Image (spheres, rainbow, N blue to C red):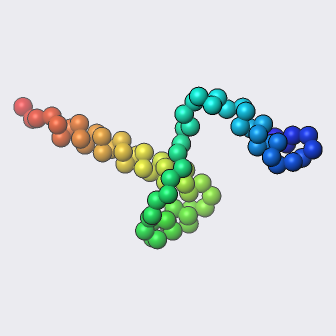
């Protein structure tokens, strides 16, 4: 989307207006330190490495929750 005149600032303002200001963002920007080999492995797969890293973390979280639930049950 480019606004008339082709200037960047009006384009950014127009994009910001399209979003509901009361809605929480789907993602949060954070600063995190990762081991070089971990970061290198994700980056080596090419563009989209951050999305893949997010998916890997979600998968780990789901499996951790499952392990936690099963650990809480006692065998009869």
The quadrant of the image that shows the N terminus is: top right
Residue sitting at 45 percent across and 64 percent down?
33
Instruction: Pinpoint residue 30: horizontal percent, then vertical percent.
Output: 50, 53
Q: Tell whether 21 sits left or right of 39.
A: right
13 left or right, relative to 70: right
Residue drawn at 30 percent across, 45 percent down: 64
Looking at the image, which residue sits at the far right? 5
Of residues 39 and 41, the one nearer the viewer is 39
Residue lying farthest left? 76
For the image, the number of numbered tags is 0
**Image coordinates for residue 43, horizontal then vertical, percent:** 55, 64
Is 26 located above or below residue 44 in the figure?
above
Q: Give the side of residue 4 with respect to residue 34, left or right.
A: right
Across and down, in percent, residue 48 comes to: 60, 54
Q: Quadrant of residue 58?
A: top left
Q: Is residue 61 left or right of residue 69?
A: right
The vertical placement of 43 against 14, above or below, is below
**Where the C terminus falls, by quadrant?**
top left
Residue 15 visible at all: yes
Using the image, determine if residue 25 lies above or below residue 39. above
Pick out the residue farthest to the bottom. 36
Q: State the residue at coordinates (44%, 64%).
A: 34
The answer to whether one can see residue 52 in this image is no
């Amino acid at each position: 989307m480019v606004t008339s005149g082709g200037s960047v600032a009006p384009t950014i303002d127009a994009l910001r207006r399209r979003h509901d200001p009361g809605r929480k963002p789907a993602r949060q920007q954070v600063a995190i330190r990762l081991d070089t080999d971990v970061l290198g492995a994700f980056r080596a797969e090419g563009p989209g490495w951050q999305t893949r890293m997010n998916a890997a973390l979600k998968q780990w979280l789901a499996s951790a929750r499952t392990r936690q639930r099963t650990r809480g049950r006692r065998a009869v």
